[in-house]
Image (spheres, grey):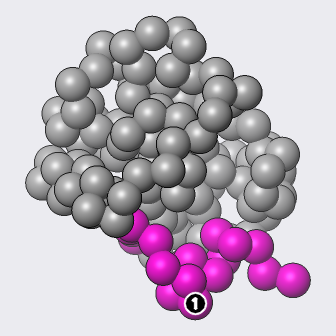
Amino acid sequence: MASIFTKIIHREIPAYILFENEEFISFLDAFPLVPGHALVVPKKEVDNIFDLEDEELSRLHVFAKKIAHAQKKAISCMKIGMAVIGLEVPHAHIHLVPLNAVKDMNFANPKLQLSQEEMESMRTKIMAHL
């Protein structure tokens, strides 16, 4: 069965897409830790990020770097944190989280529920720097 990320890639369900190329896609997390929390996902459905070929994994991180730089320019934050957890969706992905404190990256924190307007505004701000 296709993962929720594969459904986003195939436009079967909506998402706030930031950028994509033939191999990867980035979109805002629907339930972010902080505003601007984005995901970077290979279009190839692989459960474990370390099952990607070395070259794919390298390209994924370079793609993530581009998104992180755009986030940093668009969002008032100290840094962009990166995490790979992979328990919630069986499709490899990287979390890019704007950080002002260590607690911003705590995945045990309650997730935010932002309005469509807030999500679209954040998407527009980040995309302006891509």
Q: Secondary structure at mark 1?
A: loop
| Residue drawn at (17%, 50%) of the image | 125
119 displayed left or right of 52: left
122 displayed left or right of 90: left
Q: Which residues are magenta?
A: 1-21
Q: Position of residue 56 (x, y in %)?
A: 62, 54
Give the residue pinned by disc 1: 12
Above or below: residue 99 compared with residue 28: above
Q: Position of residue 94 (x, y in %)?
A: 60, 44
Q: Amino acid at mark 1?
A: Glu
Q: Is residue 65 something one can see in this rendering?
A: no
| Residue drawn at (37%, 58%) of the image | 115
Above or below: residue 109 compared with residue 117: above
Mark 1, residues whose alpha carbon is within 10 Å: few (<14), some, or many (≥20)? Answer: few
Q: Is residue 3 magenta?
A: yes
Above or below: residue 33 compared with residue 26: above
Could you tell me which quadrant the N terminus lies in? bottom right
Above or below: residue 50 compared with residue 127: above
